[in-house]
Image: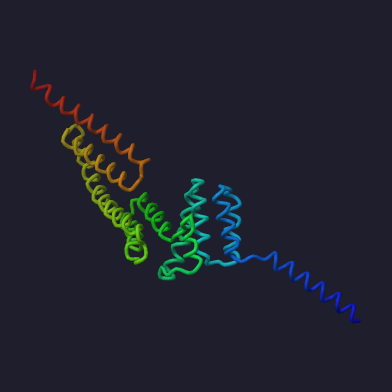
Amino acid sequence: MKRFHSIGFAVLLITGLFFSGCSQGPSTYFWEAADALRTKNYPEAQDLARRTLVAQADYMPAYLLLARVAALQNDEQSAELNYRSAYDLALQREFKLRSEDVQAADSDLKFQWQEAAFFLADAEFRRMNYNGAARFYDSVIQDPGSGDWKKKAIDDKQTVREFSGYRSKLEMLRAQNYKSPNDPRIQAEMSALFMEMASGLTRLGKMKSVAEQVALAGKFREQARQALEASILPHRK
């Protein structure tokens, strides 16, 4: 009987050790996911980050990691979804950091909630919701611990505000151009406005969109030149 109890105890001990060795905490999964991201093993990074969230649903750095991987793979929809989840968690906590947030921010990968705010501001900017973009920048500006993020948010918010004015002016000029398509003054103003927008996009780091604005500026500048020549030519005769 004693022997039976000894064997049973040994089996329970081994079983317990086995399962305790197999179970991992959220931090273990997260840092393994970070290692996978460093080596660009994106599927493994995603799988481990999701395991992190299964173990702890409010583990904010895991959402940031998933969002960054999605952005690297040009999956804008997934990136926005995960950045929004991270931002919403930060907002619920009034942007107070937990130990895992601090560790993730201090790592070489620099996972910080401000990254989510900037991505979401950019998403609102693309939708031309400039007030929405400004609100995301405000959350960074008002946070006392943002550091370099704060300076960038102040600069970007000012540029986004300018685009609100650009949009109003552009709508006005387009209406005028529709009524007077051969007025060189209107087309010259359109050209100048697109160059201003290109300058603003450069400050925001949106270099892919700059070329489009410069091309439009060149198009209207050429139309202004042709319209001006057409208006002068009859007087020369």
In this rendering, the answer to whether 27 lies above or below 203 is below
Farthest residue toward the right?
1
> Residue 221's image quarter?
top left
Q: How is the image coloured?
A: rainbow
The percent position of residue 231, horizontal first and vertical second, equals: 13, 26
Q: Nearer the viewer, residue 94 or 228?
A: 94
Q: Nearer the viewer, residue 150 or 136?
A: 150
Q: Nearer the viewer, residue 182 or 207?
A: 207
Q: Report the residue at 58% width, 62% height from top.
A: 52
Can residue 96 be seen at all in this image of the molecule?
yes
Q: Is residue 134 left or right of residue 119?
A: left
Numbered disc total:
0
> Residue 29's image quarter?
bottom right
Can residue 178 be seen at all in this image of the molecule?
no
The percent position of residue 200, horizontal first and vertical second, equals: 28, 46
Farthest residue toward the bottom?
1
Q: Report the residue at 32% width, 57% height from top.
A: 153
Q: Is residue 183 left or right of residue 204?
A: left
> Residue 199's image quarter?
top left
The percent position of residue 156, horizontal first and vertical second, equals: 31, 53
Q: Report the residue at 18% width, 28% height from top.
A: 227
Which quadrant: the N terminus?
A: bottom right
Which quadrant: the C terminus?
A: top left
Q: Report the residue at 36% width, 62% height from top.
A: 146
The percent position of residue 194, horizontal first and vertical second, equals: 26, 40
